[in-house]
Image (cartoon, rainbow, N blue to C red):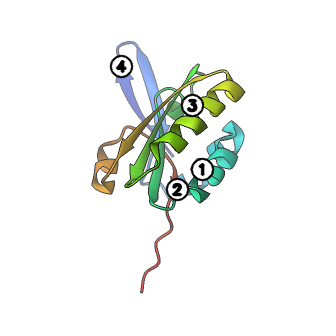
Amino acid sequence: MLASKTEGRRKLYSVNNTHPLTSDLTSIVRKVSGIDALVERVTANLPSLEQVWVCGDLARGLPSEYIEAILVGADFDRSYIKRLTDRAQSLTGKTITVKVEKETELSGAIDGLLVWAQETTEQ
């Protein structure tokens, strides 16, 4: 269920994305961290949003004063994202950085935890 890698004297663990329980574990992390409600609210107002990633220590399950997020999609209202970021910082007391990527192909190279993805409908 977990993948690990060694950095110096530390062993870091992350969710093994190929494990069948990955989606369940991701859901638990979202609910426990409070990110779940925030992501649902934000995604409703960003229709072109395709994915939301959390990176850094929080994605590794470590306590942190920083929240690093990556939004994947196009044509975002940057002022809306800035207002949300400022509000979230005041509510959480954490420093939040948000990056925007246009292509979902980049998501394979993101070192983080996928916390939301747009549902796709197959025909």
**Along the viewing direction, whichever of 115 and 8 lies nearer the viewer:** 115
Placement of 46 over or under 2, stated as above or below: below
Mark 4, secondary structure of its residue: strand
What type is the residue that disc 3 sits on?
Answer: Gly
Q: Are marks 2 and 1 in contact (CB under 8 Å)?
A: yes
On the image, the x and y values in percent for residue 29 come to 63, 42
Q: Mark 3 sits on what residue?
A: 61
Viewer-nearest of labels 1 and 3?
1
Sequence-wise first label, 1 or 3: 1
Which label number is shown at residue 42?
1
On the image, the x and y values in percent for residue 64 come to 57, 21
Q: 10 Å neighbourhood of mark 3: few (<14), some, or many (≥20)? A: some
**Residue in view at x 54 percent, y 44 percent:** 80
**Along the viewing direction, whichever of 72 and 90 lies nearer the viewer:** 90
What type is the residue that disc 1 sits on?
Answer: Val
Sequence-wise first label, 4 or 3: 4
